[in-house]
Image (cartoon, rainbow, N blue to C red):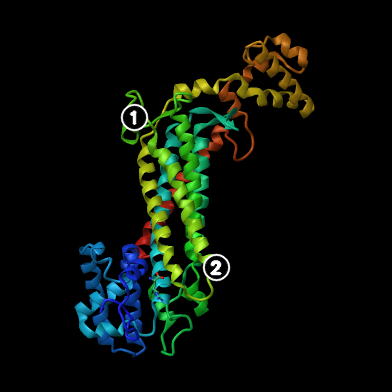
Amino acid sequence: MKKLWGARFKSELHDTAKKFTYSLAVDHELLSADVKVSMAHALMLGRIGIISTRDSKTLVRGLWQVLASIRKKCVHGFASEYEDIHTLIQVELEKKVGKLARKLHTGRSRNDLVATSTKVYLREKITTLLEGLNQFQSILVTQAERNKHVMIPGYTHLQRAQVVLLAHHFLAYVEMLERDKSRLVDARNRMNECPLGAGALAGTSLPVDRRFVAKLLGFERPTSNSLDSVSDRDFAIETLSAVATVFMHLSRFAEDLVLWNSQEFGFVSLDDQFATGSSLMPQKKNPDVFELLRGKSGEVYGNLISLLVTMKGLPLAYNRDMQEDKRPLFRSIRLLESALSVLNGAVRTLKVDEVACTKASKDSFLFATDLLEYLVKKRVPFLEAHAMVGQLVKKALDSHSSLSGLPFETYQEHSKAFKKDVYDLFDPQVSISGKVPYGSTRPELVVKQIRSWKVRLKLEAKRLKLARRRGH
Ligand code: ARG
């Protein structure tokens, strides 16, 4: 027996139909989740007396052996023989415990089984992703701390705008990733209801104990509507959407690094282990890792759209179309795992060129806003002050001078409020130290942020480790 149905059919499934419908090549990734779910189911069957306690224990033992033996073999070898991972587990179980294996599928369907296993799988994967994100945040904080005195021009429209601390820039990504983590946690919390017991779509006439199974598997409760339980994949879509948002952030970070690593900026240089060369131009050292991070986001967004489109026209309840949820889900998760591990190394080994950063931060036009606020503090109305500084900028540009190179008389021509101390403003340190509000780039505030992130991330790493040990 290599499939879980067939008695009512006169002929075997055509080879082309097999090839088209079989999913083991993809869903073998669910192996350990599916075995776990089956173990809980077997224990429940024993508990309600549909099978004996002894039989239920034998099934569980058999399932352990199945897990070990399938892991050892290369699943791809029999990808074309078995319909899916559930079938493979069933067949292997029969090899271990004999005909008793045929009782395992009592009171369930692959429809509720696959929804449950996918949730169990995802819950674990989300914990792994949270750990990866947390670790990457810590590396960003380490870089922020290591370079806490380094200033760079901050940009808007990719035009030099105002001086900021490099640490402030790194911490901006730490904030984004924190929200990304919370989106993943939300998705995980919402998927914390167990579909098993919904059967194919209507439930079962057997007295299954859904609460017991849910509890064993670490779910908060069973799902409340059997049709919904087997027919929705919003939990997968939510996860894909959260992963897509992470990639959007990582991709922007990658873009910053591609720019900063260019000769035009020269703010950072990548370690040789994380840079690549050109087959033609011997002088090149390219940031391919970061470019690919940007590039791979395309697939991640595609995966989200692919599942949304797959689901959007399906009538209730289960439809085989839903089998197509797995490839995009597994691919996106794998992509994020590998992106995070390469980023860890690439960012940890990143070297900041403080001299280049400082030089760029001394560009006098970066202080135009400070000049404007200087006037405002002397009671010049904001819009008038804006116009005055705008004219000074124009004058400097027209005479190929810097803003700080304009003579004092020129300043005075525009406003008597300008005093000699105006020249003190052309100092990046003065500029950042003068920033007032909470959340700004003022060094004491940034240092405080670094300190608080260090504590938060360390605590979170501990919490995640504990959660992993507890199995969710
Ligand atoms: N492999 C299927 C899936 O991933 C589960 C099997 C349900 N098959 C069925 N014919 N009801 O969705």
Q: Nearer the viewer, mark 1 or mark 2?
A: 2
Q: Secondary structure at mark 1?
A: loop
| Residue where numbered disc 2 is placed | 313
In the depicted structure, whether residue 300 falls above or below residue 202: above
Quadrant (top left/top right/bottom left/bottom right) for the N terminus = bottom left
User: Measured from the top left, where is residue 113 in percent x and y?
Assistant: 39, 75
Disc 1 marks which amino acid? Ser
User: Measured from the top left, where is residue 223 in percent x and y?
Assistant: 49, 76
Quadrant (top left/top right/bottom left/bottom right) for the C terminus = bottom left
User: Measured from the top left, where is residue 3 in percent x and y?
Assistant: 30, 77
- Residue 322 appears left or right of 278: right
Q: Secondary structure at mark 2?
A: loop
| Residue where numbered disc 1 is placed | 278
Disc 2 marks which amino acid? Gly
| Mark-to-mark CA distance, 1 and 2 | 47 Å
- Residue 165 appears left or right of 421: left
In the depicted structure, whether residue 145 falls above or below residue 329: above
In the depicted structure, whether residue 379 falls above or below residue 37: above
Using a 10 Å C-alpha cutoff, classify the residue at mark 2 as few (fewer than 14 neighbours), some (14 to 19) or many (20 or more).
few
Is residue 184 visible from the viewing direction of this image?
Answer: no
| Residue shown at the point (43%, 64%) measured from the top left | 324
Classify residue 106 by image quadrant.
Answer: bottom left
